[in-house]
Amino acid sequence: MAITDLETQHVAQLAKLSFTQEELPVFTAQMDKIIEMVELLEAVDTTGVPLTTSVTDRLNVTREDVAVAGTDRDELMKNAPDEKDGYIRVPAIMETGEVNA
């Protein structure tokens, strides 16, 4: 199947690309080769070939999700410059009050 310059322009527009008149034949030829390769792959008989979802035999390589105790709050608060009720106090960065519209 040969692709035309008009079809290349249409695909380029869908991809939000623009080609100059000098670039258009180059990209048309490249797209034509891609389509030829897809057509060649479509001709391969894959009957009986299992679906490939991974190229390795590994199923799950993540670690077990195990809950571990965190650092003690009192130990952490030793580094805080100011605290109240178990939370770190910081200077206010916004003024309170009404906002003028």
Image (cartoon, rainbow, N blue to C red):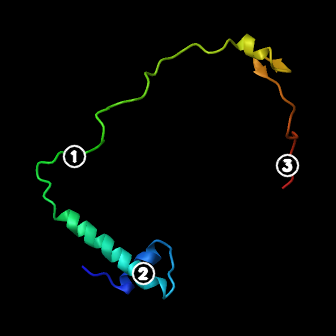
Query: Quick one: label 2 or label 3, which is nearer the N terminus?
Result: 2
Residue at image point 42% right, 81% down: 26
Residue at image point 42% right, 78% down: 27
User: Is residue 64 found left or right of 86 in the rendered image?
Assistant: left
- The residue at which mark 3 appears reads as 99
Q: In this rendered view, identify the residue nearer to me: 25 or 72.
A: 25
Above or below for 44 versus 99 = below
Visible residue check, residue 80:
yes
Per the model, the C-alpha gap separating discs 2 and 3 is: 60 Å
For label 1, the SS is loop
For label 3, the SS is loop
Visible residue check, residue 9:
no
Proximity of marks 1 and 3: CB atoms separated by less than 8 Å: no
| Residue type at numbered disc 1 | Leu
Which of the two marks, 1 or 3, is nearer to us in this view?
1
Residue at image point 87% right, 52% down: 100
Residue 82 drawn at (x, y percent): 85, 20
| Residue type at numbered disc 3 | Val
Find residue 26 and name its label: 2
User: Is residue 67 found left or right of 58 in the rendered image?
Assistant: right
Badge 2: residue crowd in 10 Å (few <14, some 14–19, many ≥20): few
Query: Quick one: label 1 or label 2, which is nearer the N terminus?
Result: 2
User: Is residue 50 found left or right of 67 in the rendered image?
Assistant: left
Q: Quick one: quadrant of the C terminus? A: bottom right
Which of the two marks, 1 or 2, is nearer to us in this view?
2
Residue 49 drawn at (x, y percent): 15, 48
- The residue at which mark 1 appears reads as 51
Residue 4 drawn at (x, y percent): 34, 85
Residue at image point 36% right, 82% down: 7
User: Is residue 34 found left or right of 22 in the rendered image?
Assistant: left
For label 2, the SS is helix
